[in-house]
Image (cartoon, coloured by chain):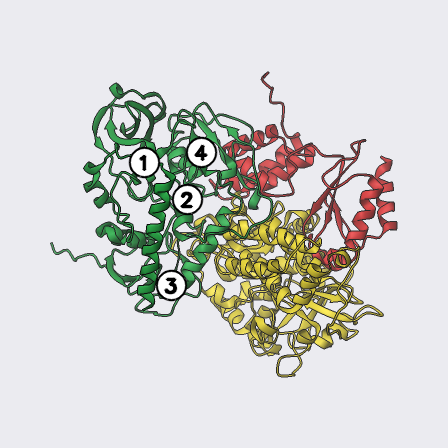
Chain colours: A yellow, B green, C red
Amino acid sequence: MPVKILTEHINVPGINTFEVYRKMGGYTAVEKALKTMTPDEIVEEVKKSGVRGRGGAGFPMGMKWSFLAKPEGVPRYLVCNADESEPGTFKDHYLMKNNPHLLIEGMIVSSFALGANKSFIYVRGELMYVIHILEKAIAEAKAAGLLGKNILGSGYDLELVVQPGGGAYICGEETALLESLEGKRGNPRNKPPFPAVKGLYQCPTVVNNVESIANTPWIVNNGGEAYAALGVGRSTGTKLISVSGHVNKPGVYEIPLGITVEDFIYADEWCGGIRPGHHLKAVVAGGSSVPILPANLILTLANGDKRLMTYESLSDGGFATGTMLGSGGFIVMDETTCIVRNTLTFARFYHHESCGQCSPCREGTGWMDKVLDRIEHGKGNMRDIDLLVDVAKKIEGNTICPLGDAAAWPVSAAIRHFRHEFEWHVTHPLEATKPGAVYRGEMELV
Amino acid sequence: METTAPQLFKITFDGIEIEVPPGTTIMQAARKIAEADSTKMHLAPPAMCYYEPLKGSGGKCRACLVKVTAGSAKDPRPMPKLVPSCITAVQDGMIVENTTNEAVVETRKGIVEFLLLNHPLDCPVCDQAGECHLQDFAFEHGRVQTRYEEERRTFDKQDIGPYVQLHMTRCILCYRCVFTADQITNKRVHGVMNRGDHAEISTYIEKAIDNDFSGNVIDVCPVGALTDKTYRFKNRVWFTKPVEAHCDCEKCSGNVTLWYRGDEVIRVTARKNEWGEVKEFICNTCRFERKKTSDWTIEGPTKVARYSVIMANKYRADLKKPDFGLKVAASQYKQIDDSRPFVTDNEAIRELSKENNAKANQRSLAEKN
Amino acid sequence: MTETTNTVAFTPERLAKAQEIIARYPDGKQKSALLPLLHLAQEQYGWVSPEVMDYVASLLSILPIEVYEVASFYTMFHLDPVGTHVIEYCRTGPCCLMGGEDAYGYLKSKLGINTGETTPDGKFTLKEVECLAACGWGPVFQIREKYYMNLTNEKIDEIIDELSKD
C-alpha cells in the first residue's frame, strides 16, 4: 500500500473529534514543533520536502515561506485558502469535512514556523456546514491547550479564525482572497507588491492551500527528506485528486505522485475504469482551467512513453500536447460528451466569475461565452471558431490575475484538440442541436 | 554638510534614454519624454483608468501594457508578460518597448476592441464626443472594424442628483469616479455594484450624489458616462472656445476653464494638463452656478491639449505627420480663423478627395520603389 | 415618498454573535466582519434588504455604499426577497457530465418554475449557481447550508415532498 499522508485515518469513525484524532497520533507534530524545533528549522524541513502548492500553481511551498518579509514590530499572517471552487476540484471540501483536525494541526505548526499569532482559514461561504465543523474542531483544540495563549507552555500564542466567503470563485486568487478577508469586493490586487511583503492589512502574509498546510504535520513528524523520498523528481509527496465524470468510482483519492495516468483511470484502487460499455474520450486533468486532452494524449506522451501523474509529466509537450496537474481536479469524459457543450459550461463559469476589474477578462469572458453559446445552439459560423482562438489569445497573459488565463485555456485547448466538433456544430446545426447530440465522427477513443 | 546627488535610474523607452528618480513608473518616465519634446507625445502609453492625481488608480484597463525587454541592469532578463506601465516602477537599466513592439501594438488593438464591445458607440449624441479618451484611444490604437456580433449589454440611465447624469452603458469601469469620491469628498455614496461585465457604477438605492465637490466626477470620467446636466445636449465641444479664468471662491481654488459659445459661458470645468488630468479639483458652485462672464476674471485662452477636437479646423495641423504637441498648438493659437468657410459643396469635396487619393497613390508607389 | 422607519436589528443572540465576530479582527480592521455579518443577517431575514445593509454598516461604522458594493459582488447574498427554501443548483461542467441537466430539468418541471423564479406559494426559489465543489458527487444542489448530492429524480421527489410538508 502506498503511503497515505493526508487520508490514512480519514475513514476512522469519529476522526473528526479531538479524542479520536489525538488517539490516532494527531497533534504530535504540534508537540514536536513547539517543544523541540525553532520556526526556521520547520521552514527548512518544508523546503527540503519539496512540497509544492496544492492550490493549482504548484509553487514550492518552502520557497514561498522563505519570501515572507519579517520587519520588526509588524504582525505576520498565515491565511489558509479554503475557497475551493475550481470546477472539478473538491478535495479540500472532502478533507476538511472528514478530518478537520488535520488542517488545524497544520495551521498550528505552519503559523508557528512563520511567526504568525493570528491565522485565518478562508472557507468558501457555500461550505457553511464545513465552517461549523472547523469551528467545533478549533474549540476542541483550544480546550486541550493547543490553541490560544502559551500553547503547551511554549510561550507561543495563536488564535485561529474561520472566515466565510460569500460566493465568488475569484476569491481563490490569493490577493482577491485577502481583499475579501478585509471585507471588500474580491478584486485581485496588482502585483507587486506580493502578499509576502504586503498582504493582509498590508502586513507580510503567506497564503497556502488547505492540502498544502495539511501536509506540514507529516513533514514535521517525519522530516522533509522522508517526504521528498516519495514521488518522482520535483513532484514530491502525495496528491489529492478529485475525480468526477464518467468513471466507475468518482471521488477523492490520495495518490503517490508518479503513478501512470492509465493506472489511475483504470486500476480498481483508483477510478476503477470508464463506466461500463463506454470509452474514454477526453480528460481535464487539473481543474476546469487546464487544457483538455483527448484520450491518446492524456495516456501517452509524444515520445510514446506513458504519461505520469506528476507536475512535469502532465505538462510534458507544453500546451501543444500536454496540460497541467493544476489543483488535481480530474474530469473524465466518455464518448457521450459533447466537447462544445462542456467548453460552453466552462466559458459560462468564467464569465460568471470574472470580477470585472480589468477589461480583457471582463469583456473577453462574456464574448467567448456568447460565441460558444451560438455555436452550441447551431447559430455559429466557421469564422467564430478562429475568433474564439483569437479572443482567448488576447485575454491570456494580459489580465491582473490568472482568471484570464484560466478562462482562455479551456477554450483554446478544446478547439486545438477537437476543432472538428466545433465545425460539425457549424455545418450540421440541425443534428447538433438535438437533445443529447454528440459528434460521432472520426475520433480516437480508448 | 555634504549632500550626495540623488541617485537616478537610467532607462530606455522606445529607444530613447532618460534618467528618472527611483520610484518613477514607466508611464511617468514616458510622459517625461513627451513633455520635454512635443513631437514624442504619441510615445506615452495611453491611459484609460490611470489618473495621476488619484491615489490607487491604474492597472485595470490594460491599455498601457508595454514590453519590458530587460528588467534592469542587474537582472537583464525580459519580463515574461506585458506589464501595465502606469503602476510598474522603473529599475536602473530597464529597457521598455511601447510603440516599437508588435505584441504591444497588437494587444492594444485587442484592448480597444474589448472596451468597445459593450460600448454603445452613440458618439453622435454623446456630450463627451470630441474630448473622449475612448474615442481617441480607438482612433489611435484600434482596428477599423469590430468582430463583435452579440447583443450589447445596456443599463438604464440614472439620475444621480440635480447636476450629474449617469449613463452607465457608456462606462468602461475605470473606477476613477470612485477614487474621486473617496479622496476629495468625505462621504462616498456611489460605487461599483455587481461584478464581471454586469458591474456598474451606481448609488444602489437611488440617491443624489450631494456634496460640494461631486461635479468633479464629470471631469475625471474618460468617457460620456458621467455628464454635466447643465451642459447636456447643448453643444458640441468643437464649437466651443475654452478660456482660463478664476474667481475668489471660498470652497476651492477658483481656477477654472470656461467654455464659450459666442458670448455665452455654456460650461465650466476644472483645468486639465496635457494628459487630460485635472490640475485642481473645483467646487460645484464654480462649476454649475457661475455661468456669467461677470462671475470671473478672465486670464486668456486655454492651451489646448491633444485630447480635444477643438483643435480641429482651428489650428493648422500637418496632416502627414500628426503633431499632438501642446506647445505647437499654443503658438498657433493666434492663427484661428473662424471665418474660414466650410466646404459644403459636394463637387468640391469629391475633387478634394480625388486629389488626396492621387497623392496617396503616388506616395505608396514611391515607397514601393 | 414617506420616510421608512428603520426597525431592522439583530436578535439578541445574533447581536452577541456579531459582536464576538467583530472582536476577532485586529483593532481598526472591523470591516473584515462584513461578510460574516451579512451571512448572519441573511440567516435572520432570508435576504439582505437595503435597510439590513444600512444596519450592518452602522454596526461596523462603515459607509452604506461599502456594504452595497460588497453584498452585490458575492452571489450568495439575496438582494431581493426569496422563498422559504432557496434551491441553488450547480450548473457547471462536471455536474452536467453527471447528469445535472436532466436532474435540474426534472426539478424545474416538478416545481413548475424556472431559474430565478419563486413558486406561487412562496415556498421554493430556484437559483442557478456555479461549481459547489462537490463535482464527484454530482448532480448537486444546496438548500441553505445543506448539500444534496448524487441527485436522481427519485431523490428530488423525496427532498421536495419532505420540504413541502411544513
- Front residue of this view, candidates A172 and A63: A172
| Residue tagged 2 | B135
| Residue tagged 3 | B101
* Residue B175 appears left or right of B97: right
Residue B222, given in percent of the width and then of the height, sits at: 41, 40
Regarding mark 3 in the picture, which secondary structure is present there?
loop
Q: Please say if the residues under marks 3 and 4 sit with CB atoms less than 8 Å apart.
A: no
**Which amino acid is tagged 4?**
Leu
Which badge, 2 or 4, comes first in the chain's sequence?
2
Which picture quadrant has residue A403? bottom right
Name the mark nearer the viewer: 4 or 1: 1
Which picture quadrant has residue A70? bottom left
Q: Are marks 2 and 4 on the same chain?
A: yes
- Quarter of the picture containing the C terminus of chain A is bottom right
**Which amino acid is tagged 3?**
Asn
| Residue tagged 1 | B342
Q: Residue furthest top?
A: C2
Q: Are marks 1 and 3 on the same chain?
A: yes
